Image: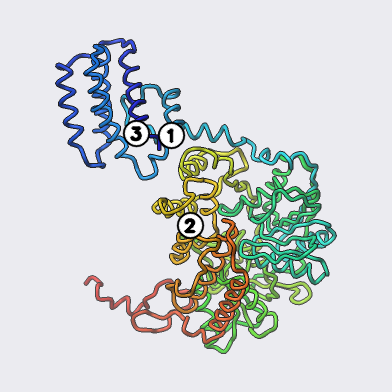
């Protein structure tokens, strides 16, 4: 924030300009102004509460404006000194005290210049808080529009100077589109694979190694380097925008519309420096991706693929657990439900692999191996199974047809159903894939949608431009105003909710964070990929923000820092290990790689042991009487206990 003295000087200059300005009507004098000054001065000095109401504060601005007319007109140096030293200074004090925590940071030289040029004399009748809001809405907005190119494709001038050629591999799941792209990647002297998941990056890394090709794996969680490697297999966020490749493969490009991660696909398509680029995607993304390529004035060709196996919806609704057969994948949408279903299966003597989002990638991989080796008969999974996991699944069964999307519980949409259902069938093993759902209504819902064409994607996600980090204003204000500026079609801004959540956490501890004022440093901290719903993870992140400059290395996490119990305790600890590696890499700290790998392996082994134990403990029961609840039952209390609840009205 600018110095208070400078703010007082600005107020005085504005009031003086107002007094000397010609007015159409003379301002009436409501009594001797020296007495009015004395009375108002006492009134302002008596106010100590920062919660002064804005209308009252605005009234003081107007009273000072009227007094200024007489004070500067008479040019009495004593009254001018009293007006500026007491009245204006007190008004500035009250204005500053009414600002919210982060608003004082907006009061910069640029803000005062904005008021002087765009809103002259506004301070004479409006509060500082009101003008801060106006500056955020208009002043910063114009500045952002001026700094950020109107056309996102022009942000990569070096890439625009290239003549790139795109090969689009378009088709549903199980059609071989990624296989053909990877065959071409194997011929690259310097190539890169870009996918959505660490598991996919690891799978491609192993395929390249099996083919005798030197390959490096790079994700946010780890790096497996290899000397003289000519292929890099990585998650899409890890793309090196400065490296020149001869061949690049961008997988699962339909995720370009994702509100949280889609900007990484947009950035890769617009900016990757590769002579030949293969993009694998569902048909829904073809139109918008070709539009992006046209904006870049690059060339492209499209190759369409059909499923190699038939996909059929069964006529009879699935009955649990009677209809479970080997090769099934049972789909539900929460970790609790996955473990509940797995527990019920094991009670029936059916061993099951489990896959869900918070499970560490290596554990997911081990669970898949158990299924591939027939040590487990079925898979119970969330929708994590729908993204590139190559499993020999005979049938997909939807135990649930609704999911919570972070805002509300809603029915599955067509793209989600097709992405998951498309995993059924495996060329050369299951020539026909089957789809079903538990209950007649659910089966009918899936049957009407599983083979319907996906709605065409019309929007692509656009990320935050780092050039805005050079602005003087606070980062959260820049983010909010940037978000409010509508981009040209087909672009849509990413969600900034998680970044703002972490900003609020960091702001409260800003005096303890070295580098908080450096927006480039702060943005690196805020964009760490962490689970913001896990309090232990957020606490560790904030601890690292406060202490990262204390030593050459970060404090290594320990299991005692996890407040969860059982399986969740070790899952949280694994996330802490990932955060340790990620934060160390981002902030240039030395990490203990050997200890990190050792702790990861120990934690993975523990999680596998916990998952191998009797899963019956995870079966959902009524919290009062302990009776087993029906599959998919949405409440924690059975009907009988609910009917006899003590607080039920009579």
- Viewer can see residue 494: yes
Distance (Cα) linking label 1 and label 3 = 11 Å
The answer to whether 483 is drawn above or below residue 367 in the figure is: above
Could you tell me which residue is drawn at 23 percent across and 24 percent down?
A: 63
484 or 472, which is in the foreground?
A: 472
Q: Position of residue 410 (x, y in %)?
A: 49, 60
Q: Mark 3 sits on what residue? A: 4
Q: Position of residue 64 (x, y in %)?
A: 25, 24
Contact between marks 1 and 3 (CB within 8 A): the answer is no
SS category of the residue bearing label 2:
helix
Q: Mark 1 sits on what residue? A: 108
Residue 316 is left or right of residue 533, and the answer is right
SS category of the residue bearing label 1:
loop
The extreme bottom residue here reads 349
| Snapshot quadrant of residue 114 | top left
The answer to whether 327 is drawn above or below residue 542 in the figure is: below
């Amino acid at each position: 924030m600018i110095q208070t003295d400078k703010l007082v000087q600005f107020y005085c200059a504005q009031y003086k300009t107002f007094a000397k300005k010609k007015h159409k009507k003379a301002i009436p004098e409501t009594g001797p102004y020296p007495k009015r000054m004395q009375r108002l001065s006492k009134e302002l000095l008596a106010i100590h509460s920062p919660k002064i109401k804005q209308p009252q504060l605005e009234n003081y601005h107007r009273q000072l404006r009227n007094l200024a007319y007489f004070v500067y007109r008479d040019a009495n140096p004593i009254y001018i000194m009293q007006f500026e030293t007491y009245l204006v200074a007190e008004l500035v004090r009250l204005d500053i005290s009414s600002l919210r925590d982060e608003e004082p940071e907006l009061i910069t030289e640029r803000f005062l210049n904005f008021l002087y040029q765009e809103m002259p004399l506004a301070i004479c009748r409006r509060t500082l808080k009101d003008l801060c809001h106006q500056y955020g809405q208009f002043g910063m907005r114009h500045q952002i529009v001026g700094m950020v190119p109107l056309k996102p494709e022009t942000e990569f001038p070096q890439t625009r100077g290239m003549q790139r050629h795109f090969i689009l591999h378009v088709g549903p799941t199980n059609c071989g589109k990624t296989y053909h792209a990877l065959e071409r990647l194997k011929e690259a002297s310097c190539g890169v694979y870009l996918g959505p998941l660490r598991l996919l990056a690891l799978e491609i890394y192993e395929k390249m190694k099996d083919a005798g090709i030197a390959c490096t794996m790079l994700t946010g969680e780890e790096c497996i380097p290899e000397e003289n490697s000519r292929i890099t297999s990585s998650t899409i966020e890890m793309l090196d925008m400065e490296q020149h490749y001869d061949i690049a493969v961008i997988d699962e490009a339909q995720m370009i519309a994702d509100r949280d991660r889609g900007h990484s696909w947009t950035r890769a398509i617009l900016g990757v420096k590769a002579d030949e680029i293969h993009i694998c995607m569902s048909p829904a993304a073809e139109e918008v991706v070709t539009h992006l390529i046209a904006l870049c004035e690059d060339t492209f060709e499209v190759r369409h693929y059909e499923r190699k196996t038939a996909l059929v919806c069964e006529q009879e609704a699935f009955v649990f657990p009677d209809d479970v057969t080997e090769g099934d994948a049972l789909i539900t949408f929460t970790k609790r439900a996955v473990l509940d279903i797995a527990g019920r299966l094991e009670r029936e003597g059916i061993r099951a692999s489990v896959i869900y989002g918070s499970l560490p990638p290596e554990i997911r991989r081990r669970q898949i191996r158990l299924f591939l080796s027939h040590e487990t008969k079925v898979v119970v999974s969330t929708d994590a199974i729908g993204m590139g996991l190559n499993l020999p699944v005979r049938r997909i069964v939807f135990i649930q047809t609704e999911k919570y999307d972070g805002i509300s519980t809603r029915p599955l949409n067509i793209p989600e159903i097709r992405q998951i259902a498309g995993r059924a069938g495996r060329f050369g093993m299951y020539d026909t894939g089957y789809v079903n759902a538990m209950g007649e209504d659910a089966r009918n819902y899936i049957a009407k949608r599983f083979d319907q064409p996906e709605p065409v994607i019309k929007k692509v996600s656009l990320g935050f431009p780092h050039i805005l980090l050079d602005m003087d204003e606070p980062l959260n204000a820049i983010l909010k105003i940037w978000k409010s500026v509508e981009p040209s079609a087909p672009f849509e801004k990413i969600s900034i909710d998680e970044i703002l959540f972490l900003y609020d956490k960091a702001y409260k501890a800003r005096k303890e964070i070295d580098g908080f004022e450096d927006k480039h440093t702060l943005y690196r901290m805020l964009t760490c990929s962490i689970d913001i719903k896990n309090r232990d993870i957020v606490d560790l992140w904030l601890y690292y923000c406060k202490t990262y400059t204390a030593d050459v290395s970060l404090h290594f996490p320990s299991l005692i820092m996890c407040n969860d119990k059982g399986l969740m305790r070790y899952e949280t600890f694994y996330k802490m290990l990932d955060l340790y590696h990620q934060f160390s890499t981002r902030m240039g700290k030395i990490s203990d790689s050997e200890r990190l790998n050792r702790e990861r392996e120990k934690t993975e082994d523990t999680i596998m042991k916990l998952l191998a134990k009797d899963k019956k403990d995870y079966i959902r029961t009524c919290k009062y009487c302990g009776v087993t609840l029906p599959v998919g039952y949405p409440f924690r209390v059975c009907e009988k206990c609910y009917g006899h609840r003590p607080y039920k009205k009579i």
